[in-house]
Image (cartoon, rainbow, N blue to C red):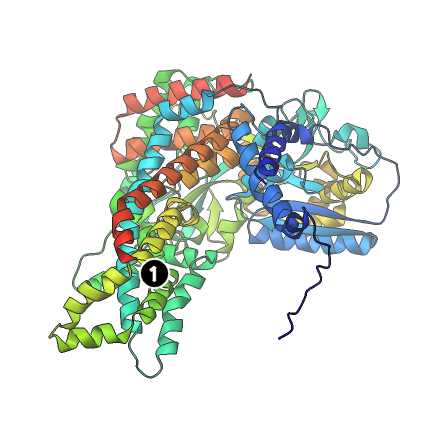
């Protein structure tokens, strides 16, 4: 058979590859690399958006570590992440297992379950969510209908955090889709063999399904952790960071310092500290789960 | 490839600092005395009443000046400062913008953050403004903005709520406390005080202490005028307001309304909250959600000994032109239209308060349009010995410190002495930093 030859339209040369990926490099440099580097430089200045920036070394980082605002925001963000991520993984996995069943009209159910993930980023939904939890709102009515006393949702730290966790928990669609795809990749023969050996459904779930979902579980864990740590819009719109800063995340701190208080240098320093924190957490997740992920191969 | 990324990162670092100062070196367009065909962006914040009136005024402008199109940019107050200050920093500010008093201090401390309107006197008639009114917009000798209206925060009550509770509008602080006790027993409260962007809880407490002491919380030069004891007295007074049921506690308010603005909350619309402390220029949004004629202006409260000072006034809103505009003549002509054109004034009414422009005010007077809540409140204010609010008191970081102190006291997380000490120290430190 005659081998087909292709002509390189730009000519084969040392820089052909580079030329072909130039559109990406230009976009990446302008919109990611440059802001990334500039942010670090600004973090070393006292820039306020009006006066020319002056170099102040690591003062912003020292102020950040000495002040209680940053520590408070980090603690709040970590608490929020620790509560939300395990819950979201559990709910999305449960939904994926249920939606993996072969019954008529399953496509419709899958779509319905995924819809909140699309709507959740819509500010109108966030505002609607806010009104669900005000006194006499739908949440109170549901509590009363099952004989429970109404809760003052916004007035206490725990319940204010719960409002935001519930909103993001409701948007479990993306994690669910990843689990669902992984579930469909597990050969049915494994379950058939287990059934023959007298293994029940629950045991099969823990002995077959969960171990085989290890990698997707890790992927979801990392993606959801990063997303949770970047939380901004929900507390900004729903609780304003209150009460007593109990829902004041790092994202809100950066926003306030940058846009409300014009501490541009400080806000950039916080952004970099935040970047280091998220990177460290992801590296820890990699290290902790290395063995389990290795077993899956 | 590695080298390429290193070079790009280095370029990023080197250009970062120079990019920061780009606003300073932006191209300045001098006036040319002509009105060319162009499109101008005009931004403002406000409630629906202001939006509707302004859009009607823009239609009138386009009928009179078909060659100059105005692109409106508008929204609510929350988040507006952040939006416009980023536009200004990034060199993408609207040509003409409604600005808040404290923006002059934070965005143009040397007077070069906005276009110098003194250069546009051919298009902008400044003779219809008092010198004192014009002085509000001057920074470092340059006219950065022109005051649209001067107003003070007044008390506006839901007459129906007071009637149902059998309570008269208070005229003194003691009467306010008594009204709180009587109305709270019936599930209502005479006033709403917030720790959101309005920061009315701290504002009212400051007025009370200013009336007692004659000292200003923050002076016009950005110095702290209150002593630590004054700050504590203000916090003590706020706690008394809560204890007497004048206002809901911070916790109750959060539970009932979440983070929503008062005029959107069922508590206000249903009449359980019987009043609001608001700028005369912005009260329309509260008036709109209640049956017509329900919201009425109340007296500015005084001490039992008759002392009535301490209430504050400020330019409620100002108009400024972006220093980066390419059409200064056209922008000035449009600003003049918005400030002083009689037909435009009739359309805008008092949605931005009683106009500071004498020509616009006369047009409203002639047309019988000089009424409503803003006017009622202004008339009451004119009888008082008012103080001009310091723009430094309006800075978001100062408001944040005050709101935080109120919240701690309300939640019982700090006593008033601790909260006062913390507020006094941090406010003094912050003001020292911004005065540099």
Residue located 52% across and 45% down the image: B283
Q: Is residue A191 left or right of residue B117?
A: left
Instruction: Residue B118: give x, y in percent of width and height.
Output: 78, 28
The residue tagged 1 is A170
Determine whether B393 is above or below A216 in the image. above
Q: Residue at 71% across / 20% down in the picture?
A: B141
Tell which residue pokes out farthest to the front in this image.
A1
Residue at image point 69% right, 29% down: B144
- The x and y percentages for residue A194 are 17, 73
Q: Chain of mark 1?
A: A
- Residue visible at 81% across and 42% down? B330
What number of labels is visible? Answer: 1
Task: Residue B368: tell me if it is visible.
Answer: no
Badge 1: how crowded within 10 Å, few (<14), some, or many (20+)? some
User: In front here: B384 or A213?
Assistant: A213
For the residue labelled by badge 1, is the local secondary structure a helix, a strand or a loop? helix
Q: Quadrant of the C terminus of chain A?
A: bottom left
| Displayed quadrant of residue B205 | top left
Q: Find residue A255 and report its horizontal and vertical position in percent.
A: 48, 38
Left/right placement of residue A23 relative to residue A162 reads right
Where in the figure is residue B195, as x and y percent of width and height? 39, 38
User: Foreground: B366 or B243?
Assistant: B243
Q: Residue furthest left?
A: A198
Q: Is residue B266 left or right of residue B182?
A: right
**Which quadrant of the rendered structure holds the N terminus of chain A?**
bottom right
């Amino acid at each position: 058979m005659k081998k087909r030859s292709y002509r390189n339209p730009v000519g084969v040369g040392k820089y052909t590859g580079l030329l072909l990926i130039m559109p990406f490099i230009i976009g990446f440099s302008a919109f990611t690399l440059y802001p990334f580097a500039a942010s670090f430089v600004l973090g070393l200045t006292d820039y306020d958006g009006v006066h020319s920036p002056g170099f102040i070394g690591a003062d912003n980082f020292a102020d950040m570590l000495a002040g209680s605002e940053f520590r408070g925001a980090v603690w709040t963000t970590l608490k929020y992440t620790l509560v939300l991520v395990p819950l979201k993984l559990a709910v999305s996995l449960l939904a994926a297992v249920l939606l993996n069943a072969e019954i008529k009209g399953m496509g419709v159910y899958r779509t319905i379950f995924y819809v909140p993930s699309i709507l959740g980023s819509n500010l109108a939904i966030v505002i609607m969510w806010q009104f669900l939890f005000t006194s006499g709102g739908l949440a109170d009515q549901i509590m009363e209908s099952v004989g429970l006393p109404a809760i003052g949702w916004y007035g206490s730290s725990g319940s204010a955090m719960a409002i935001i966790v519930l909103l993001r928990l409701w948007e479990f669609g993306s994690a669910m889709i990843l689990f669902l795809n992984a579930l469909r990749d597990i050969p049915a023969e494994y379950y058939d063999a287990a059934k023959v050996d007298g293994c029940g459904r629950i045991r099969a779930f823990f002995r077959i399904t969960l171990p085989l979902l290890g990698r997707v579980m890790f992927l979801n864990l990392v993606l959801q952790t990063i997303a949770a740590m970047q939380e901004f819009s929900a507390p900004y719109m729903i609780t304003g960071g209150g009460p007593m800063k109990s829902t004041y995340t790092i994202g809100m701190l950066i926003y306030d310092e940058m846009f409300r208080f014009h501490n541009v240098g400080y806000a950039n320093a916080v952004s970099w500290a935040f970047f280091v924190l998220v990177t460290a957490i992801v590296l820890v997740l990699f290290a902790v789960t290395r063995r389990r992920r290795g077993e899956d191969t | 490839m590695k080298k390429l990324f290193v070079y790009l990162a280095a370029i990023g670092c080197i250009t970062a600092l120079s990019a920061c100062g780009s606003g300073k070196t932006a191209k300045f367009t001098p006036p040319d005395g002509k009105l060319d065909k162009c499109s101008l962006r005009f931004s403002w914040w406000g409630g629906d009443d202001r939006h509707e009136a302004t859009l009607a005024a823009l239609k009138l402008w386009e009928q009179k000046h078909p060659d100059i199109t105005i692109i409106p940019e508008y929204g609510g107050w929350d988040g507006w400062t952040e939006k416009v200050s980023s536009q200004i920093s990034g060199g993408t500010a609207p040509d003409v913008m409604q600005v808040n008093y404290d923006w002059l201090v934070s965005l143009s401390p040397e007077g070069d953050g906005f276009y110098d309107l003194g250069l546009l006197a051919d298009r902008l008639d400044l003779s219809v403004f008092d010198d004192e009114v014009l002085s509000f917009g001057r920074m470092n000798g340059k006219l950065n903005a022109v005051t649209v209206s001067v107003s003070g925060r007044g008390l506006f009550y839901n007459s129906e709520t007071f009637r149902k509770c059998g309570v008269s509008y208070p005229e003194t602080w003691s009467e306010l406390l008594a009204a709180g006790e009587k109305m709270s027993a019936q599930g209502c409260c005479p006033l709403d005080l917030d720790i959101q962007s309005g920061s009315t809880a701290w504002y009212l407490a400051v007025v009370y202490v200013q009336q007692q002491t004659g000292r200003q919380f923050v002076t016009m030069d950005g110095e702290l005028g209150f002593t630590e004891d004054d700050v504590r007295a203000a916090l003590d007074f706020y706690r008394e307001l809560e204890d007497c049921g004048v206002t809901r506690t911070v916790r109750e308010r959060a539970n009932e309304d979440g983070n929503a603005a008062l005029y959107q909350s069922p508590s206000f619309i249903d009449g359980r909250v019987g009043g609001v402390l608001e700028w005369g220029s912005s009260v329309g949004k509260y008036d709109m959600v209640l049956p017509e004629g329900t919201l009425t202006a109340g007296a500015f409260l005084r001490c039992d000994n008759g002392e009535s000072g301490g209430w504050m006034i400020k330019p409620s809103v100002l108009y400024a032109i972006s220093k980066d505009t390419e059409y200064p003549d056209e922008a000035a002509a449009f600003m003049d239209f918005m400030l002083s054109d009689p037909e435009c004034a009739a359309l805008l009414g008092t949605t931005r308060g009683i106009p500071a422009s004498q020509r616009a005010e006369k047009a409203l007077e002639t047309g019988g349009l000089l009424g409503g809540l803003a006017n009622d409140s202004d008339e009451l204010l004119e009888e008082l010995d008012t103080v001009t609010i310091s723009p430094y008191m309006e800075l978001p970081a100062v408001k944040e410190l005050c709101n935080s102190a109120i919240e701690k006291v309300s939640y019982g997380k700090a006593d008033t002495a601790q909260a006062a000490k913390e507020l006094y120290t941090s406010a003094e430190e912050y003001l020292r930093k911004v005065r540099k």
